[in-house]
Amino acid sequence: MSTAAERVAIFDLDTAPALACIQSLGRRGIAVDAYGHSSLAAARWSRYVTRYQHCPETADRQIFLPWLQQELQAGRICRIAPTSDLMAWYCSELRERFAPAVQRSIPPLSAVVACLDKGLFAQNCDALGMPTPRSFTPESLEQALDAAKIMGYPLMLKPRTHIGVGTGPRGGIVRDEAALRQWFQPYSIRPGYEDVLAQHPGFRWPLLQEFMPSARSAVYHVTGFRDPDNGICLSLSSLRTQSFPPDVGISAAQEVHEQPDLRAQTHKLVDRLLPAGIFELELLEREG
């Protein structure tokens, strides 16, 4: 029987990334402990799950984070596969609680913020000369209306990050000023994130972004892992074939689509932002 140090803990059992990760690890003979708060989560019943354990809901930071810290201290959890933005954030918050051999593959929280804050991420892309859809991070309706005058309609309204606001708000297409006035408002903040929002008050406000029609048909992904000593040691490019909700949602299906030049460009950004860990970037093909 495998020890706790050999097993990998996976949360987010109601998501496709968790199910895919469980299958990938299990097929390679790696023991997987699945943690969830609901017996209905599909990934719980995967044949590749070594054992299932109940845990608090991951979105409830007030309860989940102390529970996870206790599990790490007791040695019942030693390794976590971060299958969501939130779990990546938690791992970085508790980075010092992991064994040194595991810590080296977990980026510091500052690096996670730079990756998950779409506003900061765009700034880093600009610094490297990587074009991004034009975006603004207004923190009032007046600022949002001024930004819309510059960008024009339609435009995208989306969370600046899902940390603290959950995964429910996915944004949408804003086609005129009346719609912007209706939909631009601060997100409801989940309990337990008061200290996060105190440090990052902009998280509660939506991001405004240039609408890219090509997002319906030409979204590429570059996924990989960066070792702290040896740099990027593997990466793969793919093409999104399905998303949910359509046009504005997250990827639901991808197929391998080799793009060496695309990967080379994104590696420069990863080297700038991420000292270590798993990464995935989305890239759009601009029409014309």
Image (cartoon, helix red, strand yellow):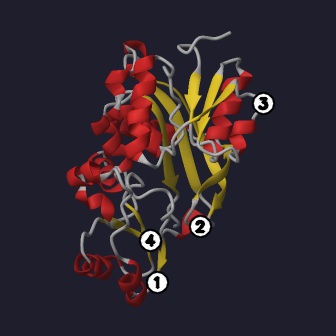
Viewer-nearest of labels 4 and 3? Answer: 3
SS category of the residue bearing label 4:
strand
Q: If you read the primary sequence from the N terminus, does the residue marked by circle 1 or circle 4 appear first?
A: 4
Q: If you read the primary sequence from the N terminus, does the residue marked by circle 1 or circle 2 appear first?
A: 1
Q: Which residue is denoted by mark 3 in the rendering?
A: 47
SS category of the residue bearing label 3:
loop
Q: Position of residue 286 (x, y in %)?
A: 50, 62
Q: CA distance from mark 4 to mark 2?
A: 11 Å
Q: Which residue is denoted by mark 4 in the rendering?
A: 156
Q: Which residue is denoted by mark 2 in the rendering?
A: 247
Q: Position of residue 193 (x, y in %)?
A: 32, 51
Amino acid found under the numbered disc labelled 1: Arg
Q: Position of residue 52 (x, y in %)?
A: 66, 30
Q: If you read the primary sequence from the N terminus, does the residue marked by circle 4 or circle 2 appear first?
A: 4
Kindly identify the residue that appears in the image at 50 percent across and 52 percent down.
283
Q: Nearer the viewer, residue 242 or 67?
A: 67
Q: If you read the primary sequence from the N terminus, does the residue marked by circle 4 or circle 3 appear first?
A: 3
Q: Is residue 60 visible?
A: yes
Mark 1 surroundings within 10 Å by alpha-carbon count, few (fewer than 14), some (14 through 19), many (20 or more)? some
Viewer-nearest of labels 3 and 1? Answer: 3
Asked which quadrant contains residue 112, the reply is top left
Contact (Cβ within 8 Å) of mark 3 with mark 2: no
Q: If you read the primary sequence from the N terminus, does the residue marked by circle 3 or circle 1 appear first?
A: 3
